[in-house]
Image: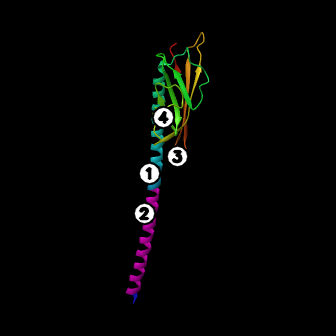
Protein backbone atom coordinates (compact mmCIF):
# COMPACT_ATOMS: atom_id res chain seq x y z
CA UNK A 1 0.00 0.00 0.00
CA UNK A 2 2.90 2.29 0.68
CA UNK A 3 4.29 1.63 -2.81
CA UNK A 4 0.96 2.56 -4.43
CA UNK A 5 0.74 5.99 -2.77
CA UNK A 6 4.34 6.78 -3.78
CA UNK A 7 3.55 6.02 -7.41
CA UNK A 8 0.49 8.30 -7.28
CA UNK A 9 2.49 11.13 -5.78
CA UNK A 10 5.21 10.89 -8.40
CA UNK A 11 2.56 10.85 -11.16
CA UNK A 12 1.05 14.00 -9.65
CA UNK A 13 4.51 15.59 -9.47
CA UNK A 14 5.11 14.64 -13.10
CA UNK A 15 1.82 16.29 -14.19
CA UNK A 16 2.62 19.47 -12.22
CA UNK A 17 6.14 19.59 -13.69
CA UNK A 18 4.71 19.09 -17.19
CA UNK A 19 2.23 21.95 -16.66
CA UNK A 20 4.97 24.25 -15.35
CA UNK A 21 7.20 23.37 -18.30
CA UNK A 22 4.37 24.10 -20.74
CA UNK A 23 3.73 27.49 -19.14
CA UNK A 24 7.43 28.28 -19.31
CA UNK A 25 7.57 27.32 -23.01
CA UNK A 26 4.51 29.50 -23.76
CA UNK A 27 6.12 32.46 -21.98
CA UNK A 28 9.38 32.01 -23.91
CA UNK A 29 7.48 31.70 -27.19
CA UNK A 30 5.51 34.91 -26.49
CA UNK A 31 8.74 36.74 -25.66
CA UNK A 32 10.36 35.46 -28.86
CA UNK A 33 7.42 36.62 -31.01
CA UNK A 34 7.46 40.02 -29.30
CA UNK A 35 11.17 40.43 -30.04
CA UNK A 36 10.62 39.40 -33.66
CA UNK A 37 7.82 41.96 -34.00
CA UNK A 38 10.00 44.71 -32.53
CA UNK A 39 12.81 43.77 -34.92
CA UNK A 40 10.40 43.87 -37.88
CA UNK A 41 9.17 47.33 -36.84
CA UNK A 42 12.76 48.55 -36.58
CA UNK A 43 13.58 47.15 -40.02
CA UNK A 44 10.51 48.74 -41.64
CA UNK A 45 11.29 52.13 -40.06
CA UNK A 46 14.86 51.91 -41.33
CA UNK A 47 13.66 50.90 -44.79
CA UNK A 48 11.23 53.84 -44.85
CA UNK A 49 13.95 56.25 -43.73
CA UNK A 50 16.42 55.02 -46.37
CA UNK A 51 13.81 54.99 -49.14
CA UNK A 52 12.66 58.53 -48.33
CA UNK A 53 16.25 59.73 -48.13
CA UNK A 54 16.92 58.31 -51.62
CA UNK A 55 13.70 59.94 -52.85
CA UNK A 56 14.80 63.36 -51.62
CA UNK A 57 18.20 62.86 -53.26
CA UNK A 58 16.41 62.11 -56.55
CA UNK A 59 14.32 65.28 -56.18
CA UNK A 60 17.50 67.30 -55.67
CA UNK A 61 19.13 65.78 -58.75
CA UNK A 62 16.04 66.49 -60.84
CA UNK A 63 16.00 70.14 -59.72
CA UNK A 64 19.69 70.85 -60.48
CA UNK A 65 18.86 72.70 -63.71
CA UNK A 66 16.31 75.05 -62.16
CA UNK A 67 16.28 78.46 -63.83
CA UNK A 68 16.71 81.00 -61.05
CA UNK A 69 15.77 83.94 -63.30
CA UNK A 70 12.12 82.88 -63.57
CA UNK A 71 11.73 81.15 -60.21
CA UNK A 72 9.57 82.85 -57.61
CA UNK A 73 9.70 82.30 -53.88
CA UNK A 74 6.85 80.88 -51.83
CA UNK A 75 6.40 77.59 -53.69
CA UNK A 76 5.22 75.82 -50.51
CA UNK A 77 2.20 73.77 -51.52
CA UNK A 78 1.12 70.26 -52.50
CA UNK A 79 2.36 70.91 -56.04
CA UNK A 80 5.70 72.49 -56.92
CA UNK A 81 6.57 73.74 -60.42
CA UNK A 82 10.24 74.53 -61.08
CA UNK A 83 11.18 76.27 -64.36
CA UNK A 84 14.19 74.65 -66.02
CA UNK A 85 17.02 76.26 -68.00
CA UNK A 86 15.95 74.43 -71.18
CA UNK A 87 12.54 76.17 -71.12
CA UNK A 88 10.51 73.30 -69.67
CA UNK A 89 8.95 73.14 -66.24
CA UNK A 90 9.58 70.31 -63.81
CA UNK A 91 6.68 69.50 -61.50
CA UNK A 92 6.37 67.59 -58.25
CA UNK A 93 3.13 66.90 -56.44
CA UNK A 94 1.66 64.67 -53.75
CA UNK A 95 -1.21 62.43 -54.73
CA UNK A 96 -2.47 59.46 -52.71
CA UNK A 97 0.40 59.98 -50.23
CA UNK A 98 2.99 59.48 -52.99
CA UNK A 99 5.26 61.92 -54.79
CA UNK A 100 4.64 62.24 -58.49
CA UNK A 101 6.88 63.94 -61.03
CA UNK A 102 6.32 65.38 -64.47
CA UNK A 103 9.09 66.67 -66.68
CA UNK A 104 6.97 68.97 -68.85
CA UNK A 105 4.42 70.20 -66.32
CA UNK A 106 2.37 73.27 -67.18
CA UNK A 107 0.00 72.97 -64.24
CA UNK A 108 -0.79 70.58 -61.42
CA UNK A 109 -4.03 69.19 -62.85
CA UNK A 110 -2.81 67.83 -66.18
CA UNK A 111 -2.27 64.13 -66.83
CA UNK A 112 0.93 62.15 -67.30
CA UNK A 113 2.46 62.26 -63.82
CA UNK A 114 4.92 59.50 -62.86
CA UNK A 115 4.94 58.11 -59.33
CA UNK A 116 8.38 58.33 -57.71
CA UNK A 117 7.59 56.83 -54.31
CA UNK A 118 5.80 53.76 -53.04
CA UNK A 119 3.34 53.62 -50.17
CA UNK A 120 4.70 50.22 -49.13
CA UNK A 121 6.79 51.51 -46.19
CA UNK A 122 5.65 55.12 -45.76
CA UNK A 123 3.25 57.85 -46.84
CA UNK A 124 4.43 61.24 -48.03
CA UNK A 125 2.72 63.91 -45.97
CA UNK A 126 4.37 67.03 -47.32
CA UNK A 127 6.93 68.24 -49.83
CA UNK A 128 7.86 71.90 -49.77
CA UNK A 129 10.38 73.98 -51.69
CA UNK A 130 11.32 77.53 -50.74
CA UNK A 131 13.51 79.73 -52.89
CA UNK A 132 16.04 82.15 -51.43
CA UNK A 133 17.34 84.66 -53.95
CA UNK A 134 21.03 85.29 -54.40
CA UNK A 135 22.69 88.09 -52.50
CA UNK A 136 26.13 89.65 -52.86
CA UNK A 137 27.58 86.95 -50.59
CA UNK A 138 25.41 83.90 -51.31
CA UNK A 139 24.26 81.86 -54.28
CA UNK A 140 20.55 81.19 -54.85
CA UNK A 141 19.19 78.36 -52.69
CA UNK A 142 16.34 75.91 -52.80
CA UNK A 143 15.26 74.78 -49.33
CA UNK A 144 13.64 71.34 -49.48
CA UNK A 145 11.43 69.75 -46.83
CA UNK A 146 10.05 66.22 -47.13
CA UNK A 147 7.80 64.84 -44.38
CA UNK A 148 6.81 61.17 -44.25
CA UNK A 149 4.84 58.92 -41.91
CA UNK A 150 5.62 55.22 -41.59
CA UNK A 151 3.04 52.47 -41.26
CA UNK A 152 3.83 52.41 -37.52
CA UNK A 153 2.88 56.15 -37.31
CA UNK A 154 6.46 57.34 -36.87
CA UNK A 155 7.14 60.66 -38.57
CA UNK A 156 10.40 61.72 -40.21
CA UNK A 157 11.17 65.13 -41.68
CA UNK A 158 14.06 65.59 -44.10
CA UNK A 159 15.44 69.04 -44.92
CA UNK A 160 18.10 69.88 -47.47
CA UNK A 161 19.61 73.03 -48.94
CA UNK A 162 20.42 73.03 -52.62
CA UNK A 163 22.77 75.63 -54.09
CA UNK A 164 21.71 76.59 -57.61
CA UNK A 165 23.93 77.84 -60.39
CA UNK A 166 22.70 81.24 -61.63
For label 2, the crowd category at 10 Å Cα-Cα, with few meaning under 14, some 14 to 19 and many 20 or more, is few
Q: In terms of secondary structure, what is the magenta stretch mainly?
A: helix
Asked if the residue at tag 4 contacts the one at tag 1, i.e. Cβ–Cβ closer than 8 Å, the answer is no
Q: Which residue is mark 1?
A: 36
For the residues labelled 3 and 2, the Cα–Cα distance comes to 29 Å
Q: Which residue is mark 3?
A: 152
Q: Secondary structure at mark 2?
A: helix
Q: Nearer the viewer, mark 2 or mark 1?
A: 1
Asked if the residue at tag 4 contacts the one at tag 2, i.e. Cβ–Cβ closer than 8 Å, the answer is no
Quadrant of the drawing holding the N terminus: bottom left
Q: Nearer the viewer, mark 1 or mark 3?
A: 3
Q: Can residue 160 be seen from the camera position used here?
A: no
Could you say which disc has been placed on residue 139 in the image?
none
Q: Nearer the viewer, mark 2 or mark 4?
A: 4
For the residues labelled 1 and 3, the Cα–Cα distance comes to 15 Å
Q: Which residue is mark 2?
A: 25
Amino acid sequence: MLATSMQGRSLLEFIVALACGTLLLLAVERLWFWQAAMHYQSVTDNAAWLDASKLLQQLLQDAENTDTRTLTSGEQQQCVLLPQKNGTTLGFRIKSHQIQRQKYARNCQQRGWQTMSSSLHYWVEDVAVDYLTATANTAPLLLWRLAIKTRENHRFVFTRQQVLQP
